[in-house]
Image (tube, rainbow, N blue to C red):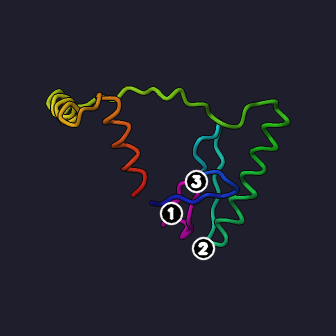
């Protein structure tokens, strides 16, 4: 995965060939906090600076820095896939919710 954890906060990492640098972007924040560097060590350093600047700004503005998640989301899939997933879940003795949650947990472990 192109994921890095900086000071306990997850960030996605990509390569920007236009500027020949890696770009990091924190996820789960109530705003944008990105950072750039040429190497992994630089990403850690620049990421820590960017995150702290974002958190400091939130304190100044009295804003909540982190998004909250309800645990609910809608997924639109083909009706045939929906039917197949329900059948597989039922064959395992699970609800659709249980099956989807288990499958998502497995997907993020890899």
Position of the N terminus by quadrant:
bottom left
Q: CA distance from mark 3 to mark 2?
A: 15 Å
Which segment did they paint magenta? 11-25
Is 108 placed left or right of 88 in the picture?
right
- Residue at 61% x, 58% y is 5
Residue 102's image quarter? top left
Pointer 3: what residue? Answer: 11
- Residue at 53% x, 54% y is 12
Position of the C terminus by quadrant:
bottom left
Q: CA distance from mark 1 to mark 2?
A: 12 Å
| Earlier sequence position, callout 1 versus callout 2 | 1
Marking on residue 16: 1
Eyeballing the image, is 71 above or below 52? above
Q: Position of residue 93 (x, y in %)?
A: 24, 32
- Assess whether residue 17 is covered by the magenta stretch: yes
Q: CA distance from mark 1 to mark 3?
A: 15 Å
| Earlier sequence position, callout 3 versus callout 2 | 3
**Who is closer to the viewer here, 48 or 90?**
90
Eyeballing the image, is 31 above or below 110? above
Q: Secondary structure at mark 2?
A: loop
Eyeballing the image, is 90 above or below 57? above
- Residue at 38% x, 37% y is 101
Q: Secondary structure at mark 1?
A: strand
Task: Name the main secondary structure of what is drawn in magenta.
Answer: strand
């Amino acid at each position: 995965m192109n994921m890095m954890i900086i000071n306990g906060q997850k960030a996605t990492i990509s390569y920007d060939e236009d500027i020949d640098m890696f770009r990091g972007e924190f996820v789960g924040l109530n705003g944008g906090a990105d950072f750039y560097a040429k190497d992994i060590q630089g990403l850690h350093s620049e990421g820590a600076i960017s995150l702290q600047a974002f958190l400091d700004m939130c304190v100044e503005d009295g804003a909540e820095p982190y998004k909250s998640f309800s645990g609910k989301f809608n997924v639109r899939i083909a009706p045939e896939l929906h039917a197949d997933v329900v059948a597989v879940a039922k064959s395992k003795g699970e609800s659709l919710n249980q099956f989807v949650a288990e499958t998502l947990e497995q997907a993020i472990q890899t």
